[in-house]
Amino acid sequence: MTNLRDIVIGVVMGGVSAEREVSLKSGRAVAEALSGAGLTVREVVVDAGVSEQLRDARIDVAFLCLHGGWGEDGRVQALCEMLHLPYTGSGVLASALAMNKPQAKAIFVQHQIPTPPYCPALSREFVFETMRFNPPLVVKPSAEGSTVGISIVSREDEFEAALAKARQYDETPMVEKYIPGRELTVGVFEGEPLGVVEIIPEGGFYDYERKYSSGQSRYVAPAEIPAETAGRLRELAKRSYQALGCRGAARVDFRLDPEEGPFVLEVNTIPGMTALSLLPMSAGVSGISFVELCQRMVRSALKEG
């Protein structure tokens, strides 16, 4: 086994997606944790010149903290493989599938994993007349994270504005039926589910601001739910992770309908790693500290590489 003290860990952050600032926060938190553990860390802040920046970084493993379509969709993962550079998280195909929400949801359906009904947001007529969807609905980009560009449509006349907002980030947005109930998440590491965390937004929807602003949401870790429900969520998290072919660390987000039970919303293959992030909370429920989680992710990358 490689001694982590003998290698240079490159924490790759930044990028050009709408989530650049979150990426920088994640990267700096990881870099601080690993360097505080006595490891050699190099912060690699990248932009559109990522291929040259990674090639010239002189690192032994890439700890990927790139969020959003540009860094989470398999392209940077493919670049790392071309450079023979071990990297954290899922491989090229799993990353691409998870980032493309309609493709991921099609796989969930194939594996009988409950997920909200969905369709492409082609037009108001297609959604409400052809597909016969009724509000409330969620309109969102097909390939963004951190709730960027997302809207909840309570009335049909709100649809056009929501579609225009989503199209600022994605040419082919999607619509899914809004699932009422509680918002929960489960981390998964190397195929094993971690603890269940509940997110309680203050005053409404868990949007970008509430995700990354202290005091905008309350978190319950572990979630105060029956043991049977927690077991079901952890089982679905594991199945979702496996269905997409994920590896390393990931996070699976849920809505818990009070009548119909849990629905998988999405799998995040590069979850946030800030002080407010959910994967570290989920790991904490399982007795894994933030520093230990970061170290385990590096070891996992070296094993896969």
Image (spheres, rainbow, N blue to C red):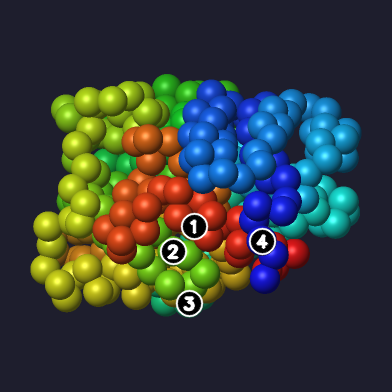
Q: Give amino acid for label 4.
A: Asn
Choose the circle earlier in sequence order: 4 or 1: 4
Choose the circle earlier in sequence order: 2 or 3: 3
Q: Give amino acid for label 1.
A: Ala
* CA distance separating discs 4 and 2: 24 Å
Q: Residue 111 carries which label?
A: 3
The residue shown at (43%, 72%) is 192
Q: Position of residue 145 (x, y in %)?
A: 50, 39
* CA distance separating discs 2 and 3: 18 Å
Q: Position of residue 181 (x, y in %)?
A: 18, 51
Q: Position of residue 108 (x, y in %)?
A: 47, 68
Viewer-side label of 4, 2: 4
Q: Residues within 10 Å of mark 1 (few under 14, many from 20)?
A: many
Q: Mark 4 highlights which residue? A: 3
The quarter holding residue 96 reads bottom right
Q: In which quarter of the image is the C terminus?
A: bottom right
* CA distance separating discs 3 and 1: 18 Å
Choose the circle earlier in sequence order: 3 or 1: 3
Q: Mark 1 highlights which residue? A: 250
The residue shown at (83%, 28%) is 49
Viewer-side label of 2, 3: 2
- The reply to whether discs 2 and 1 touch (Cβ–Cβ < 8 Å) is yes
The quarter holding residue 256 reads bottom left
- Element carrying mark 2: strand
* Above or below, 27 relative to 102: above
Q: Give amino acid for label 3.
A: His
